[in-house]
Every structure is written in structure tokens, then in C-alpha cells.
Amino acid sequence: MTVTTWHGGAAAVVTLTFDVDAETPILAAGRRYADHLMTMSHQAYGPDVGVPRILELLADLGVPATFFVPGWVAEQRPGLAATIVERGHEVAHHSYSHRAPTSLTAAEERADFERAIEVFDAQGIEISGHRAALWEATRVTLDLIASHGLSYDSSLMGDDRPYVLAVDDRSVVELPVHWSLDDWEQYAYLPSPQIGSVIESPRKVLELWRAELDAMRHYRCLFNLCLHPFLSGRPSRLLAVRDLIEYAQSCGDVHFTRCRDLAAAASSDRALLPRTPPTVSADSTIYPD
Amino acid sequence: MTVTTWHGGAAAVVTLTFDVDAETPILAAGRRYADHLMTMSHQAYGPDVGVPRILELLADLGVPATFFVPGWVAEQRPGLAATIVERGHEVAHHSYSHRAPTSLTAAEERADFERAIEVFDAQGIEISGHRAALWEATRVTLDLIASHGLSYDSSLMGDDRPYVLAVDDRSVVELPVHWSLDDWEQYAYLPSPQIGSVIESPRKVLELWRAELDAMRHYRCLFNLCLHPFLSGRPSRLLAVRDLIEYAQSCGDVHFTRCRDLAAAASSDRALLPRTPPTVSADSTIYPD
Amino acid sequence: MTVTTWHGGAAAVVTLTFDVDAETPILAAGRRYADHLMTMSHQAYGPDVGVPRILELLADLGVPATFFVPGWVAEQRPGLAATIVERGHEVAHHSYSHRAPTSLTAAEERADFERAIEVFDAQGIEISGHRAALWEATRVTLDLIASHGLSYDSSLMGDDRPYVLAVDDRSVVELPVHWSLDDWEQYAYLPSPQIGSVIESPRKVLELWRAELDAMRHYRCLFNLCLHPFLSGRPSRLLAVRDLIEYAQSCGDVHFTRCRDLAAAASSDRALLPRTPPTVSADSTIYPD
Amino acid sequence: MTVTTWHGGAAAVVTLTFDVDAETPILAAGRRYADHLMTMSHQAYGPDVGVPRILELLADLGVPATFFVPGWVAEQRPGLAATIVERGHEVAHHSYSHRAPTSLTAAEERADFERAIEVFDAQGIEISGHRAALWEATRVTLDLIASHGLSYDSSLMGDDRPYVLAVDDRSVVELPVHWSLDDWEQYAYLPSPQIGSVIESPRKVLELWRAELDAMRHYRCLFNLCLHPFLSGRPSRLLAVRDLIEYAQSCGDVHFTRCRDLAAAASSDRALLPRTPPTVSADSTIYPD
């Protein structure tokens, strides 16, 4: 039996990821919101106030991170991606417009995907991986990732450790996410478009994530945390993230890494045999449209 | 007065039940979700990652459990039911397709029910009991359970102890469930189809269930816990289940059993007089359709 | 200045009230649910399992309570109201069918109101007060209460102490309720009809209510707790109610009473000057229908 | 580099703000609710019971506050605004009717804005600032604020410190708000119109706000708390506000001020360079209406 190596001996591996969505999830719900000043300012807080504060925190604690940035956001704020990369972090592909792939035709999805690639190319930002908007990846998404030579995706939930997907004749590393390691479900709140229903206390969120980290150390998993600067960039939430990182560092058996580096480690792990992407056949005589 | 015996002298009886729904609740909301890779992988995590981990936990702690498996799931993952039975647990009937009986015609419900029976027959899995998809049992459900000679149902909420239903000229033991002893309301979250709104901390869930277990020991009830491997199979949630089981074991007055064994004990309890299934007559001059 | 006397010198007055709705709120959402066995059994648990357990608890602790019972429920379960009264508690009017008055015509509301009066008359149950279904009282509701000579209503939220409403040439005591002193918002959960979204831990609910009781002792208010036997009759929730009552008793300055007795005390309190019921005039050139 | 001075040396500045909405948010959802007595009484509790209690609390603790009052409310309750001002607090503009500006035409918004100005003028109440109904400010809102010579707005979320907006050739100070410092998301609950889903414990809310205050002291921010008298005027919630204020006072580095005074300090802070209001251009070939 081949011994698995992706974790490099750590009890758990942590990838801190920040989805710098800015205005895009709102615009995807309707252009009309562009005139809603509060909503736009709520989203702009992410790159404008949250990101600088997050970069400072990461520098303080000496941990690397991965920032998933929609092409539109990189385009609108020209220096943003470069600043992140200069600090030693990774910038990764997060669509151009943050529309859910499951809501697009294959041609629309391809155009959106490639437009983001062009933006990052033009800015000299090297891209190694992808996360689907709303995590709503399709079979087309995987094909685009593979055909553009990216090494990983981070949108699926089929495991809580990295795994390898066979896509056509290539391999794509999947760095799985999960709703419980996302700040959106804990903090997001907007009445129009309607998002969220409860604003949780950072203490509850810290408790939730610490428990998951400890359990993932027990089971040797990937703690792939997904944060949004417009949410977790707020003062008390960011200090809770700081507490979490400091706790993880104090454990002594947790490894922090960028997604691209973890994807490389997973790619060279001979124990990770390629799996087939989800292929579910649903009988039309039983299940409705 | 006849002395009741179903509890065998325990202060509370625990039935750990796992609904191995996999993709079925999502497909029942629409076949189109079969192409939503994240959603499908979220559900596949249940049988693929959650169940093996759960089986290991149950073996570690030496407690038996009951797994309610839709026929479609047993069919799609041929070794699944057999593996569960080999470990000493019970596999029970959970419909074929996980569509709510209240949404089907009597003929559709019968066909669905019997198709699951055929799947388990073909796999050599002996079935003693049934739980309706979404707990949405109808009068037809009870008739099917009785006419197929199953000994129990576990879908209703008319009590918090086992009770006996008179169905035609037969008796069906009801092992009642409740929303507060289900992990779905605490953890389930999906935006599309929209499920859930808040992701609770396992600490809160453990607090909720420990309080109910203690109170059920006070009132001598059935603690019929309903868990979903795609939810409670996640690391920190499963460790909370471990804590709960270990706590129950430490009480010294809690009995763990499989549903079929509890149904047998309830069947032979002479104090449990058969009750009529809910029969509510609603005046059409008062109540709307 | 006239000194107010309704509280009888207590720091806070507690009225424990139980809305024994049984199946009615569900049938009001649609007769079709009569065939949903789980839903019906979920509601039947209230009078069948919850009420006996509640009566036992109240007897143990020696506190009186008020049970608001829809006429339909009293009719369907003939001994129910009498049993409650025999234990020294009050049975009060809670409509016949539990349809919201705001959804009925004046004639429909009158017919519903009077049908409940007839049911209680036929059962020899003396009625002194009323609570609107869903608390959705209308101006017609107040007129019916006044014209039938009932002494109080318990549906409004204009204060947190008893107050007196001038209705035509009569006075109706209002014993105000509030969402935060209702178990529905904390515990109710049903997917179809859709009710509730989060099931809270009894520990949180106890914390919420203890904090309000303490603050009401500070401000000398009426702690008018609204519980539903199908919700708070469950084991751990009922033990939380026990903890709350025992805590209140231990304070030494809290008075427990039935609604009718408190209404009498408020009626004879000369400091409570009659107020006008809410009369809001909304300009149709500004506000939509 | 110019040193910023808006905070006057404090670690954090606190503006306690009370939105005295009374019936207006409900009427904006439909005039028909004027006949829903419970709902109207629920809202009337704010000015009738909540505000006097809040004024007493503020006097006890010796802290100033700002009350945002819709013109309609000031008109309906003639002595309300004057009483607030007499106690040393600020009354500010909160629209006339509490309809969201984003739902109005420019002409409708202007008429609504100016009608409130007239009400306050007639009552001799001096107005310095504005908060949009539902925080749903538009570009028109900023123009109205600037053209009427008000010094600040408090509806946007682009930062967590005061900032200055360039509006035409004037400057408007923005005192930013945030969902997490609003009691609505924690406490509001009404079934019809449907508002809220969970009623939180004041202990949780206090924990949330204390954590944010502490973090804002760390980052030197504006703690702009938005409270509604019909929500936070309830006994235990108000005592939680008392605890929060007393905690802030005990820190020794927190400054309490009225919004108008903070706006003045921000106006004279040379380090606050005017920013452009949010101007987002959304491509119609990508984003839907």
C-alpha cells in the first residue's frame, strides 16, 4: 500500500482562503443594485478596508493565504491582485463575474472563465487554481480547469482531504470546501437582495471552527477555510480569525500553506488515485425536472 | 394494571439511526441538480466518507445502530447495505426514491415502496421496519408496512415512547421521531435547492441532545436520534456524537438497541394497547384547502 | 397621584399560559394536512402527552396557570377543558378554529368567536378572557370581548404591564404578550406547512426568559409566558420550564396568578386609566395597500 | 502626513443611535396593517414605553444619544422630538414615511425628504443629519442632504470610521453603520409582515457588541450602534444596553458623542480626504436586470 504524503506529516493542513468578491455577488443578482449605495458600500468594504487589514494580520502572524479574486474585481481595482502577490500570497481564479456556472450555458461559462484568465494575464498574475462562483461548478468548469492547465479546483465537497479528479486525460486536484468552514453562513446579512437571516457572534464562529480544526487534527484532514473580506474583515471577526490562527499555531502539528502548494503536494502523492467526478443519473420516470 | 416492559428496566432507551439519503433528497427536488457537481459531492460524502467513519466509531464504542437506506442508494452502491449488516447493524426501509409519500398518489407510493423491497430482497438484506422519506407518512404508508409484514414504523411524533398502531387487523410498532433529535435542523445548509438557514456549532447540538437525553431518563422515554452521514459524518460533528454516546454510556441506566429489537420488545409489551392512527376530520366550511 | 395596585406588591407578576392549539394552526393552513400523519401526530402530542405532563408539573410546584383552548380542540377532546379546570387552572377563549381574525370578515370572526362560547357553555366551562389566534386581534375582536362580558384580552403588545382599553362603553383589561416570551419562535419547526427555521436549546431559552424575568422584576412588569404543549411539553423543554418556575419562586418577590385573577386586580386598579385601542390612520397617497 | 483627529484621542468613539420608527416600517409594507391591532401595538411600544425608559437610562448613565425620527412619527406624537431634545440629545432626519429611497422615484424621495424637514421646522427642532429608511440611500439622498445643508449621513457601510463624501461641490460626513451593530437582526420578529426568524438572547447580543467594541478599540473605529425602542426598549434588552454602556465607560478610552458633534469633528479633520460616493458600472451584457 502506498503511503499518503499530501499532509507532509502534519495532523491537519490549513489553507486560509479569501474570496474577494466585492460587488460581484450582488450585481449577479441584478444590475439595479448598482444604484443602492449602502449595498455597494457594504461590498466595497471588502477590498477597500478588509483586505489591507487582512494582509497586515497575515504578515503579523507569518502565515500564507490564497485569495480567490473574480476577474471583474481585479480589473476594477488594478493594484489589488499585485499587492496580494507581493506579500507572498496566492491569487487564484474565481470566475470573471461571479455568476454561478450552473446558471450559464457552456459557451457563457467558457467566455466568463477565459475573460478572467485574460485579466490576470494582462496584470502578470500567475494563476494555478480555480474556485467556482458560489462553488456551483459544472462538468464544464472541470474541463476548463483541465484544458487551461490549472492544477486544482476548490469548489466540491466529496471529501475532507485533497483528492484527485480524472478530467478527460488530465488530473485536477480537488481541495474540498464545506459550508461549515465558510464565514458567509455565519455572518452574511442583506435584506435586498435577501441574504442570510442570523448574524452570529464571532465567539460562536470561533468555537465552531476550533472544534472542526481539532477534529480534523484527529482525522488528519484539510481545514480549507473560506473567508470574505467584506464579512471577516470587520474588527471583531478579524480578531476571531487571529485567535483561530494563533490557536492552530500553538497546536504544533498544523501546517499552513497556499492552495497551489498543497495542490502540488497532492499531485505528487501516489496514494491519491484519480476519482471520477460526480456522475449521477436520475431516472426521469421518478424524479421531477 | 399491566406493567410496561419495552424499556427493559433502562431509564432511557437510545436508538441511533442514520438516514443514508445520499443524493436522493436533492434529486427529489429536481433531476437538474444531477449536474450540480458541488451539490452531488456534498451528498455523496455521506455514504463515501461519513458511513465508514461512523461504522468505525460504532465499533469503537460497541453500540448497535439502524441505518435507513433508500432503495435507490442501496442499488447505486451495491456493497453498502451488506457492509452495514456485516458489522452487526440493522438496515431498514427508507423508500426507494426519497420522495415524500404525501406528494405521491397511492399507486406511486406503493410502487416506490415495493421497488425498495425488491432491491433489498435481491441483496439478501432482511428488512423489519420502515421510515418514511421526510417522515411524511400517509395512511397508505402504514397499510404498506402492515401488509408487507414489517414490524415497525419510525416516522410519527404522537409520543416520546414506543407505541402500537392498529392498522387494519395488524399491529405496527411506532418508534417516534422528533425534529429536535434530528441533525438536519441543526446542520443542513444548501442554497440551491434552498435548505437550512443556520449552521449550528456541534457544542450547541451536543448541549441540546444531552439535555433531552437527561430529561428522557427522567421521564423514561425513547431517545430516537436521527443522523445523516453527509451531515454528522463531518469531523467535529462526529466527535460530538462520540461525546454524546460516551456520556450516555457513563450514565449506567441507558440502553442502546437497534430499532428492530426495540420493536420486538414493544410488540411483546402487553401494556401498550393499540392506538388508532391520526384521523382528523377538518370541516370544509371552516378550513381552506 | 393614584398608586397602582395591580401587582399586589410583587416585583413581577407571572402568568403561565398554555395555548392548547393541537391540530388547529395546521388545519388553518390547509385541510389537506389532515392526511399528513406525522404533522397531525406532532400536533396531537400537545394535548395527549404534553398537557398531562404539564398538569403534573404545575401540581408539583403548586402554581396556577391559564390554558387558552380553541373551541374545536375542546370539542374534539371532550374531557380536556374539564380536567384542566378541576386542577384549579383557568380555561380561556382562544377562538373556535384558530384562524387569524385579520384574515376573516367581521361576520366570520363573530361566528367563530360565538361558536367557541357555545362549546364552553355546553361543557360548563366558565370563560373570563380571550386570546386571539396568532395574537392577530382586530377591532372586532375587542368588540366581541366587550359585548360578551369577558374581562380581558391577551393578544396585544402596547406595554409590558396590564393596561385597560376603552371599548365602546366598557373596559377590557389587556394582559400584553410578546414574541420573546413565546416558545413558538424558539422551538417550532415544521417543513410543510413551513414553520420555523432554527430549533434552539432549552438552555438558551431558559437564559432568555430568566434574563427577562429579572429585568421585569427591575421594572415591575407582567411576565406573561406563552407556551404550547406540543412544543414545551417535550422532556428537556418542560424541565427548563420547571427550572424557570423554581427560579422565580426562589426570588421571593414574584407572584404567580391566573389571567382572570390578574384581570380582576387590574380592573380594580384606579391608577390604570383607560386607553384607546390602536387607531392608526395611514395616508393612501403615501403608503401602498 | 496629516494626523487624523476625529476620534479626539479616544480608542473608540461610540454613537448611541435610536431609530424611533414606530408604525412606519409596517405601514410602508402595507396600509392594511393599520387594522392589525397587535402589530400596531407592537410598534407603538417603541415611542410609548421604550423611549421614556431609554431617556431615563441615558440620564442615569450620563451619556448623550441621537434619535432618528421619521417626520410622520414626530407629527403623530407632537411632544416626542421636543422631549428628546430637552434631555440634551439630538433628533435627526429619518425620512418622513420610512419608505426605502431605493423604491421611490427621485421626485417622490425629494417630496418625502422635504416633508420631514417641514415637520421638524414647524416643531422648532434643529436637524443636522440624516439616516435613510432601511439605510437604502440613493444618489438622490446624498444630493438632498448636501443641498439642504445637513452635515452628515449615517446609512452607508464603506468603512468603520467616519469618512467624507464629495457630493457635488459640498462635503457630507458619513458616519457608517453596519448590520452587526443593529438590534433589528438580533431581535425583530413579526409573522405578518414577515420580519425576522430568530429571537436572540440579550446575552448573545451583549457578547456580540462587546466583542466588536473591544475590536474597535483595537483598530480605533466608530462604534455606531443602531437601536430601535420597540425592540431594545424591552426590559432585559435595555438592561443589556446598560451593561454595554457601563462596560464601555469602564474601559476609560471610549468617547460617547452625538452624531452631529462627531460629524463636526470629522468635518474639521484635515486627514479625511473626500471620497467619491459608490459609482458602480455594471455591464448589461453580463449582469441581469
Image (cartoon, coloured by chain):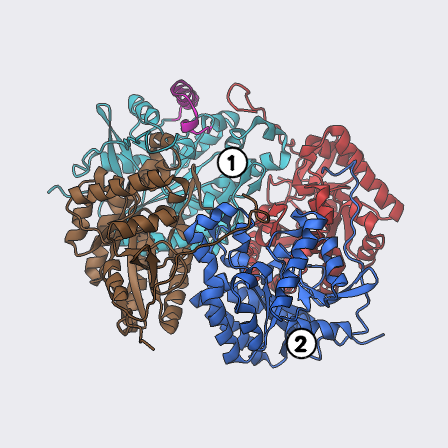
Chain colours: A cyan, B brown, C blue, D red
- Crowd class of label 2 (few under 14; some 14 to 19; many from 20; radius 10 Å): many
Q: Quickly name the residue at label 2.
A: C11
Q: Quickly name the residue at label 1.
A: A47
Q: Residue at x 24, y 58 (%)?
A: B260
Q: Is residue A114 magenta?
A: yes
Quadrant that contains the C terminus of chain A: top left
Helix, strand, or loop for circle 2? loop
Helix, strand, or loop for circle 1? helix
For residue C176, which quarter of the picture?
Answer: bottom right
Position of residue B140 in the picture relative to residue D147 (left or right): left
Q: Which mark is residue A148?
A: none
Q: Position of residue D73 (x, y in %)?
A: 78, 48
For residue B89, which quarter of the picture?
Answer: bottom left
Q: Position of residue A184 (x, y in %)?
A: 47, 43
Q: Residue at x 47, y 69 (%)?
A: C238
- Tell me where the magenta segment starts and ends, as one range: A98-125
Q: Residue flagged by tag 2: what amino acid is it?
A: Ala
In this view of the protein, which residue sits in the foreground, C121 or C24? Answer: C121
Position of residue C111 in the picture relative to residue A100 (left or right): right
Q: Residue flagged by tag 1: what amino acid is it?
A: Pro
